[in-house]
Image: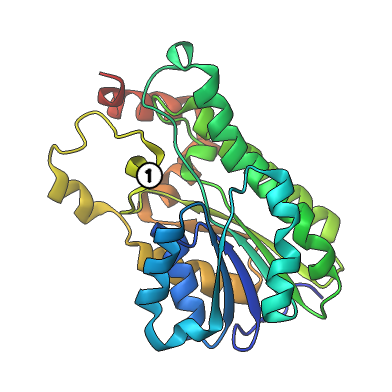
Amino acid sequence: MNANHFASRDKVFVVTGGGNGIGREVVLGLLRRGAEVAAVDLRAEALEETAQLAGSLADRMSSHVVDISDRAAVAALPDAVLSRHGRVDALLNVAGVIQRFVPFAELDYADIEKVLDVNLWGVIHTTKAFLPLLLARPEARVVNVSSMGGFVPVPGQTVYGASKAAVKLLTEGLYAELRGTPVAVTVVFPGGVATHIADNSGAAAPGAGDNNAEMAAKLATPQDAAQQIIDEMERGSYRVVIGKDAAMMDKFSRIAPQRATDTIAKKMASLLS
């Protein structure tokens, strides 16, 4: 049964986005639980900082500078991980970028392709690369991070939302196909989390500095988000919603989808000002 409890200790995890934000905290959280981690990120300096934060636990971490939108680079990643760790027990796709805060009509193709390449194709590439290894294990996990923006639209993030909605259905399809195998599949929907995703994506939100302390106080921390992801991954949960905002909009969007869309559009209209 692919939903058995899955203890992290002595398992080998591949984590994308391991150089910052939620991904970094997932790496650190897994190391603290006794796991080995292959941390993947586009930036070598970010991975080095993660290793420094890991301290004495870093001897169980390997760093892999890979652009997950590059299919050939990702295809070479399993051999690199196997050469260091010997096996792979779980894949956690945490890496992601947002788009510039502009309407779809003003978004150029380079921006659109970047978001889709990282958020959707990156997940496809890593899953295709590692799934054969995971299926060979007695128990394994795939965890893909979608977003609250994958079930309710945010002004100025239409393509980002589309990419995360695609990750949602991709993950649910994987779950349906992998029932009865050793691989349990989890999709994660974070709401607002206090990360630097906007800065790292080159897409700072308009008015981001306004009421910054007040806004930050309402956001989940990357540490809390990571702990919830790891806990639910170990349980083999099908679906994980992180944050009160995501939980509320998850219910609202199912009960009254148009009203939910109108509410978010009005409340967050300033993102397009």
Q: Is residue 77 above or below residue 192?
A: below
Q: Position of residue 218 (x, y in %)?
A: 24, 53
Foreground residue among 247 and 122: 122
Q: Residue at left 77%, top 56%?
A: 129
- Nearest the viewer among 50 and 233 is 50
Rendered-image quadrant of the C terminus: top left
Could you tell whether 272 is left or right of 5 in the image? left
The residue at which mark 1 appears reads as 200
Q: Amino acid at mark 1?
A: Asn
- Depth check: 63 or 87 in front? 63
Q: Residues within 10 Å of mark 1 (few under 14, many from 20)?
A: some
In the rendered structure, the answer to whether residue 122 lies left or right of residue 110 reads: right
Residue drawn at the location 53% of the way across and 56% of the way down: 94
Q: Quadrant of residue 254?
A: top right
Q: Residue at x 49, y 81 (%)?
A: 31
Q: From the top left corner, tell me how far across and down residue 17 is, in percent.
A: 50, 56
Q: Indicate the position of residue 24 as horizontal and vertical percent values.
A: 43, 65
* Quadrant of image for the N terminus: bottom right
Assign a secondary structure to mark 1. helix
Q: Is residue 55 left or right of residue 238?
A: left
Coordinates of residue 177 in the picture (x, y in percent): 85, 55
263 or 235: which is nearer to us? 235
The chosen color scheme is rainbow
